[in-house]
Amino acid sequence: GEEPKTLPDYAAWKERTALIVHSANTMETRRDAIGQGVVTPSDRLFVRNNLPTPPASIVANRDAWEVRIEGVKNPKTLTIGDLKEIGVSTVASVLQCSGNGRAFFPHGAGGTQWSVGAAGCILWTGVPLKDVVEALGGPVDGAMYITSTGGETLPEGLDPKTVKVERSVPTRAMESALLAWGMNDEPLPLTHGGPLRMVVPGYYGVNNVKYVKNVAFTKEQTDVKIQASSYRVRDVGKKGSPDQPSMWEMNVKSWVTSPLTSGRKGRNMIYGVAFGGTVSLDKIEVSLDGGKNWQQARFLGPDLGPYAWRPFVLAADLAPGEYRIVSRATDTKGNSQPEGRIDNERGYGHNGWSDHGVTVTVS
Ligand code: MSS
């Protein structure tokens, strides 16, 4: 549809010119606004809400927000004030929507037509989940999943299971998960889940539950729709079901952020971003001829750890002409971006390098 001109109230503080506003619930960073920084400025970060944002009153007294921890030896309700006494850590991680890149699928995958901008690299500050769990006696025997519940008030008249934002991730995520109250060195904005958010570094956006009010160690995955049938990778035309892969660990990915359409003959600096999900990066290559020849590009700025993205740059001396510029990241386990995409009903997890390329005219 037509692009709405204004930002919704709850996101009015965002930098309008840096965003494509798809709807009142979905905004992505423009490709030319991603920049060359190691961290995405908060006012440029994409937004994706499945439900109306809770009222601002929930961030009026942040330290009083309560989260219930269950499925541990000593279940307990803790305030953010309590959490702050248990421990604190800061982790850089990429927040990326499962459907980032959906716009490139030719079958017209349903949902927001995200290009590359439903992603950003954020500094999250909070308490390591494993410290909280340890303080409460550890997980109950047989716990397989960490199940987090969002704090939205559910719309009336609907089956809660069809609308509730509740996500289960495997307990292996406990090593890096964080209950975060800070984002980019500021109190976590309501727009991004304040006062408290579950952060699962290297996992797709949906697992990073905002306004988290309940965290449970469970034997089974939750049976709510957003877990059981949504965010499942399946063939085009198939319905979602619990036996299909869930959108958990992100795959290795990169894209060029500049130039996007035109350049001047001579030296051009080609910029982009790359990340490996839960695995750190080994290298990033750039091709100026649509993938026939590759050159190794150089990472730019400090390495903020395995879950962060790395801006990259390649200096290229270009004669007038047309260039198909693509990038391909490889992680330290040897996983590389594929050339193509894996078609799937909802257009999830696209990391193919070909579709993410840009055609640049140099004159
Ligand atoms: N949480 C809650 N609570 N709610 C909602 O809705 N969403 C998801 C996550 N979390 C939600 C939550 C998603 S889906 C995403 S991406 C993310 O979040 C986003 O974020 P920001 O902050 O950006 O908005 Mo896809 O995979």
Image: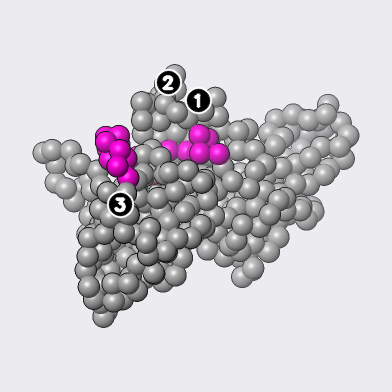
Q: Earlier in the sequence, mark 1 or mark 2?
A: 2
Please report the residue visible at 30 percent of the width from the left and 38 percent of the height from the top. Answer: 60
Q: Earlier in the sequence, mark 3 or mark 1?
A: 1
Given the image, on which type of amino acid does mark 2 rest?
Thr
Q: Residues within 10 Å of mark 1 (few under 14, many from 20)?
A: some
Mark 3 near ligand 1 (CB under 8 Å)?
yes
Q: Residue 299: x percent and y percent?
A: 72, 53
Q: Disc 1 and disc 2: Cα gap in Å? A: 8 Å
- The residue singled out by tag 1 in the image is 16
Q: Residues within 10 Å of mark 3 (few under 14, many from 20)?
A: many
Kindly check if marks 1 and 2 are in contact, taking CB atoms under 8 A apart as contact. Answer: yes
Please report the residue visible at 64 percent of the width from the left and 62 percent of the height from the top. Answer: 281
Q: Quadrant of the C terminus?
A: top right
Q: Quadrant of residue 87?
A: bottom left
Task: Write down the region rendered in magenta.
Answer: 41-62
Q: Residue 161: x percent and y percent?
A: 18, 51
Q: Quadrant of residue 172?
A: bottom left
Q: Residue 188: x percent and y percent?
A: 42, 44
Please report the residue visible at 32 percent of the width from the left and 72 percent of the height from the top. Answer: 135
The image's mark for residue 212 is 3
Q: Is residue 236 above or below residue 157?
A: below
User: Mark 3 falls on what kind of element?
Assistant: strand
Given the image, on which type of amino acid does mark 3 rest?
Val
- The residue singled out by tag 2 in the image is 6
